[in-house]
Image (cartoon, rainbow, N blue to C red):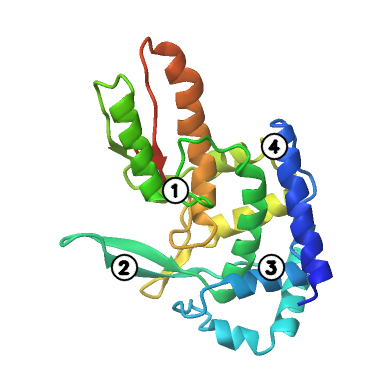
Amino acid sequence: MQYTDIGKTWQKLSLISGHAQRDPGFQFTSLAHLLNVEYLRGCYKSLNRNKAVGIDNVSWEGYGRNLDENLELLVSRLKRKKYKPIPARRVYIPKSETEKRPLGISALENKIVERGITWILESIYEQDFLNCSYGFRPRRNGHQALTGLNDLIMFQPVNHIVEADIKEFFDNVSHEKLMEFMRIRVKDTTLLNLIEKFLKAGYVDDGLLVKPDAGTPQGSILSPMLANIFLHYVLDTWFETTVKSHVKGFCEIIRYADDFV
């Protein structure tokens, strides 16, 4: 890997984070160009090499045999706006003794691009996300959420606890609202169009192609980031600005993905 190229990209991501932190109203107009060969090589190398293959039937090892050529072709398609995400392969995993949870297995190239987009969005939105949010974030986990919840109950004047789970949240996220929220910070139409392509790529279930009108692609690398962006605006910020201003006593929220207390 040429350190100079990948190093430049990480340096740019760091500058993006700085802009986002200093100016909560700053809008980013040029982001898609960061998806270059060396950056995507880093994305490829970060992937779990033993994961199941998508409908393209391409493994991590198989893609890597002609990595330079594959990445150059991928970047060429991205630049010409000819890249089209491959639908996920839907499988079902046990959720409980009676229920199963749907999961999408992405194609290898989808995963590379999704990882790249996720890191770009992370550099912006990690500066915006509130402390109450713990799910799918760097250096944050469920144990910390439980510790935070315990501390609030033990050390704050709490006498009511409401536990909630948004039913079928990942299947019902409004694409229109999500893109509306993203345009608050991101004005790069190339990147936004690329994200929309992933939302609309759909999945193959028992041989049938399904293209949902709502929801984030379950099991994809990009989905948790998109879910956090959506919930940042509709739940976390709403609670912080609206709920707290209408409550006389103490109140706080702790959220892990679509579960919150």
Q: Residue furthest left?
A: 97
* Viewport quadrant of the N terminus: bottom right
Closest to the observer: 137 or 37? 137
**Are dots 3 and 1 in contact, CB under 8 Å?**
no
**Mark nearer the N terminus (2 vs 3):** 3
| Disc number lying in front (4 or 3) | 4
Q: Amino acid at mark 1?
A: Gly
Q: Amino acid at mark 3?
A: Tyr
Pointer 3 or 1: first along the chain: 3
Front of the two marks 4 and 2: 4
- Residue ID for mark 3: 83
Q: Secondary structure at mark 1?
A: loop
Residue under label 1, please give it: 135
Q: Are marks 1 and 4 in contact (CB under 8 Å)?
A: no
According to the image, label 4 marks what residue?
Answer: 21
Question: Callout 3: helix, strand or loop?
Answer: loop
> Which residue is found at the position 53% from the left and 74% from the top?
107
Which three-letter amino acid code belongs to the residue tagged 4?
Answer: Gln
CA gap between label 2 and label 1 equals 22 Å
Q: Earlier in the sequence, mark 1 or mark 4?
A: 4
> Could one spot residue 259 in this view of the protein?
no
